[in-house]
Amino acid sequence: MRRNDESEPRAEVPAGRTAAALNRTSVATVIIGGTEETRLLLRGLVRLHQHRVLSEKASADDLEMADPEDPAQVLILVADGEGDEWPHELATARARQPGLLPLLIVPERTPDLIARARRMGVRGVLNRPFAIRDLVSSVEAVAHGEDILDRVPGPTRPRGGQT
């Protein structure tokens, strides 16, 4: 299977150990949706924090089947706000890679969106714009099985530490 991060070396898996056991601190992600620029930015931020991006696609329809030796843990699903395609994208991604834990990035958090996301098994919702630390902590929390739908990231502080 071709991956976007061909430059990342794959560790040799010793007998009796799984690839997941070797990568406990590194979260394997899949990015779906948004513009090419958005996916590039998300990929860079995820990789900057020592996590892996196994695939990034404009649509879940283009997503490969899961690699049983190195499955993705977190689905970062970018909803553009111009329609309501994210439920279809989520269902398609889960059909191709079962077990993905979804983190939804939206233009606006609303109570209705949170309720719908909860019904569909989404683990967290980030409102754009967001702070880098909120993206990273959300990816890590979701990867560890936390439901962070009710967590609303705090406001970003201005540069220079001023409040």
Image (tube, helix red, strand yellow):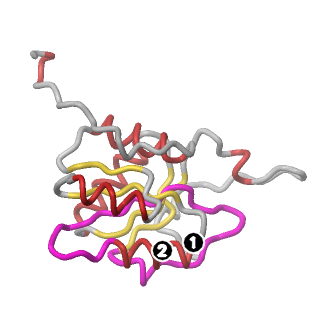
Q: Nearer the viewer, residue 48 or 62?
A: 62
Residue drawn at 29 percent across, 49 percent down: 126
Query: Left or right of 69: which side holds 162?
Result: left
Q: What span is colored magenta in the figure? A: 58-86
Query: Left or right of 129: which side holds 143?
Result: right
- List x then y, in percent, for residue 5: 49, 62
Q: Quadrant of residue 119?
A: bottom left
Q: Quadrant of the N terminus?
A: bottom right
Q: Are marks 1 and 2 in contact (CB under 8 Å)?
A: yes
- List x then y, in percent, for residue 87: 36, 73
Q: Quadrant of the C terminus?
A: top left
- Amino acid of disc 1: Gln
Q: Nearer the viewer, residue 41 or 128?
A: 128
Indicate the secondary structure of the residue bearing disc 2.
helix
The residue singled out by tag 2 in the image is 93
Indicate the secondary structure of the residue bearing disc 1.
loop
The residue singled out by tag 1 in the image is 97
